[in-house]
Structures are given as structure tokens and as C-alpha cells.
Image (spheres, helix red, strand yellow):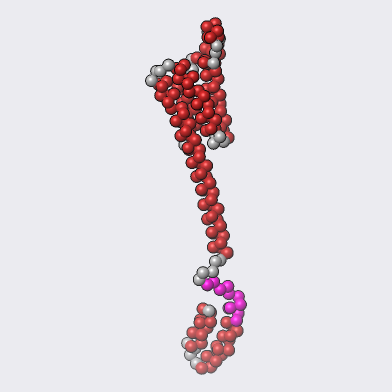
Amino acid sequence: MQAIGHFSLVAVFAKTKSQQKQHQSKVPLLQALCVKNMIQVEVGTITLSAVALMLLSAFLGYAFALRRVKFQAKHNAAIEFKQAIKPALDKLKRGENQFKTIQDSCEIHFQAATTFSAHLKGNELEFFETALNNYRHWQDTVYGRTTTEIMYDTEDPEYLEEKSRSPIELLKELLKYANT
């Protein structure tokens, strides 16, 4: 449409009548060429680039939303894990009976750790499982002994090594993986 208007204006501004007639004879040919080769875009028409941009925006929005949901799930699991460990850690720091504190809370710790580990991947999961196994081994060695073993196996090197480890440090090692 603009091409037609342009050629009409040129015809009006021609200086002489002969130039106007000569120009008017060329106008239909030029109009036909411009309309044929020109892609006309009207207001409201969706172009291919607009569709591509909308699809890209939708994909990026979906990817970011999915990432946010996964992070939020891991964050919530970390909070629950911290809430399971924190009371026992506070009791140990206050100097309460270590045996009673560990025995009362170790199953809660293992259940919370199992739930939390479902949200970890790769090296982070591997290191967390190593720390959890260290805590479990310490708990089994120090507090998983029978009365006879406690009385007669006090010179066991494994027992002495594990007994020298602090449960506070073992729990803090587990908690460092729950920082989100």
C-alpha cells in the first residue's frame, strides 16, 4: 500500500506534463513489481520470528521454573534434616549425657539423612554418604556394643579410635551438606 502511495506522489510532483505522462505509464509496472516482491505485514500479524521468540521464552520460563522447584525441594529437605539433627547437637554442646542423647536420636538422624540424600547428586551425594557412614560406624562401634564387649574389649584399637572422635564434629560434618 505504501508503494502505491509513493508512486502516486511522485507522479504529482513531476515538473512537466510529458514527464507526468511518462511517469504514469511506468507506475503500474512498478506497482506490480513492488507488490509482488514485497511481504506485507499488517498490525496483528504474527511473524515467524515472533513465534520463535515466544517459544524460546516459554522454554526458558519452564526451565527456570523447574530448576526453582527442584531447588526448593532440596532446600525444604535440608531444613527438615537440620531440624532433626539440631536438638541432639544442642544437647551435646550443653554437656548432657552423650550415650542417652545419641541412642535417643540416632534413628531420627538416619531417617532424616536418608530423606535428605534423595535430593543430592554426584560428588555431593558421595561425600554425604561417606560422612553418614562415618557417623553410623562411630555410633555402632561406641554405642552398639554389648555389656560384655564394653567390660572386656576396652583395649580394642577400633573402639579406642572411634571413642576419641567427637559426636559434635561428626554431626557438624553431616550438617555442612545441608547448607542451601
Whether 59 is drawn above or below 129: the answer is: below
Q: Position of residue 56 (x, y in %)?
A: 55, 56
Residue 35 is one of the magenta-drawn residues: yes
The residue range painted magenta reads: 32-42
The outermost residue toward the front is: 104
Q: Is residue 56 visible?
A: yes
Q: Nearer the viewer, residue 20 or 36?
A: 36
Q: Nearer the viewer, residue 44 or 144?
A: 144
Q: Position of residue 131 (x, y in %)?
A: 53, 26
Q: Position of residue 58 (x, y in %)?
A: 54, 55
Q: Nearer the viewer, residue 164 or 76?
A: 76
Whether 60 is drawn above or below 30: the answer is: above
Q: Quadrant of residue 98?
A: top left
Q: Quadrant of residue 120?
A: top right
**Residue at position x 50%, y 38% in the image:** 74
**Residue at position x 51%, y 81% in the image:** 6
Count up the numbered dots: 0
**Residue at position x 51%, y 93% in the image:** 17
The outermost residue toward the left is: 94
Q: Quadrant of residue 88?
A: top left
Q: Is residue 128 visible?
A: no
The outermost residue toward the bottom is: 17
Q: Nearer the viewer, residue 18 or 177?
A: 177
**Residue at position x 55%, y 88% in the image:** 23
Residue 53 is one of the magenta-drawn residues: no
